[in-house]
Amino acid sequence: MAFVFQPQNVVANRDVLFYRTDQRHTSVPGVLIFDQPKAKGESFDFNRLIPPPVPDDQNLAMIPLFKLEPDPKNKGNLVPLALQRALRDDLPGNNLNIPHSGNWQEGRLPDMEKIRKVVATDYFEAFQTASPSNDALAQFDALYPFIADLRMASASRPYCRFPHDYPPQPPYDFLRMVTVQIQIAKTLNLHAVLALDAHKPDLALEDIKANFKLIAGLRQEPFLVSGLVAIGMTAINGKGAIYDGLVRHSWDDAQLADLQNELAKADFLSDYQHVLRGEVGIAIPSYDNLKSNRPRLADVFKTHDENKYQHPKPKSESWNYFPNLWADGWLDLWKVRAVNFELNAVSFVDPKARLVFPIKVDEVASAIEQRQHRWDAYAPWNILSGAAVGPIDNAVLQFSEIQVWIDEARIACALERYRLAHGAYPESLDALAPASIDELPRDIMNCQPYHYQFRPDGTYLLYSVGWNQTDDRGKVVYKKDAPMQIDYKGGDWVWPGH
């Protein structure tokens, strides 16, 4: 059944909006439940969000590396055994532990000396012999031969669509495949960094494009976790190889144009809305299933971590029996509030206008905080509602920040193309279009041009006004309680050019 929303079918009730589909009420006065839709509108039928199938011989996800097989350590689960072996988690200094490969916002480049040392150590551990040369790229190729196969398959297969069922509950076998791709991204990124260091920019670009092919597959999926992993993989690409290659001035004009095209395919604002609609499609049957599975409902409150969106639960052991006494109407209210929250959160961004609305996010976060202090905060229907909504504001921040990075990387490629043609960076971004970039993207935080400063030493500073929508003149702000971590809610989102 499709769930339909239209603006005219909204009824205000206390601090919540309920989406009207008919006149049938639950056992809680004023609460409506979803029924057969009576008007055309936006469908939340989960099946409409599932990516279409693609031919196996054109699908990167169908190569043997990604095959799911029974887990010998945990019967009943499926895992990508070939991929796990290929990633060499058995090595003491495997790619997950190699020193940080750079950070564009801090202008920090990969520490090649440390990376070479760890690669050499792993090579000795794997083959019980010293490498015949000091070529870190050759050592890495010997450790991770799957990279060459993955690059070749990526170049010849235009699609990436991981096959799995889409039941009402999240497909956990699929999620294992999703999360392991962070490891693939780190491996590809380190190989690209080593290729740049070996003066092989064409090879590094192939690594980057293979990673983007995997990211494109994840971006189609209607799950929030898929979107967040895609963000992580994109950030790994950018913090390491892409930024490193631009700083090294490694690529020629054609390669930079190719990289620009890859970056331009990303639209993380649309992806944000896509995954939230997917969360709604999963949420509705999930909440309905809790009515007939009350022990599972008790488990929800035993296992979930407390955060600012959740009410603290009573410490009494009798809490485990309470769900058996709760009226179905309270569960309906939980469902409606949770779905309403996620539907409202869809409007936190506008992909067509390419805008993000931090003020909307902050208003909702404030309203939730205030609700925790109401007289009925511990009423069952409100406890349930408090547990139902997640940290969407953090998700909006992550999707926004990565889209800004994509925009800045595209502009940085255009700046490098201009430098190759003219011998120096331009005084203004206006000089870039259309020769170096078709059209300059605008800052998604205020729809204004990105800020650009050409410096006397020949370098530049490129930045977005960031979450606070204030021009802090390119200043990066760090967290007070963690001075080494950037506070993305304060200061500007910066790309320092060299």
Image (cartoon, rainbow, N blue to C red):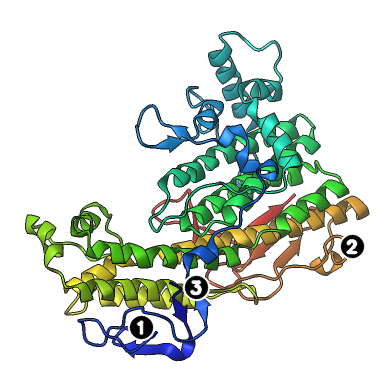
Residue nearest the viewer, comparing 399 with 324: 324
> Among all residues in the image, which is located at the extreme right?
422
Q: Identify the amino acid type marked 3.
A: Val
What is the count of numbered marks? 3
Residue neighbourhood size for the residue with mark 2, other residues' Cα within 10 Å, grouped as few (<14), some (14–19), many (≥20): few
Name the secondary structure under disc 2: loop
Looking at the rendering, which quadrant does residue 151 occupy?
A: top right
> Is residue 490 in sight in this rendering?
no
Q: Please name the residue that numbered disc 2 is placed on.
A: 435
Q: Please name the residue that numbered disc 1 is placed on.
A: 18
Residue nearest the viewer, comparing 290 with 257: 290
Rounded to the nearest whole Å, what is the CA distance between mark 3 and mark 1?
Answer: 16 Å
Q: Identify the amino acid type marked 1.
A: Phe
Rounded to the nearest whole Å, what is the CA distance between mark 1 and mark 2?
Answer: 51 Å
Rounded to the nearest whole Å, what is the CA distance between mark 3 and mark 2?
Answer: 36 Å
Q: Residue at x 52, y 82 (%)?
A: 41
Task: Tell which tag, 1 or 2, sits nearer the viewer.
Answer: 1
Mark number for residue 346? 3
Q: Quadrant of the N terminus?
A: bottom left
Residue nearest the viewer, comparing 188 with 178: 178
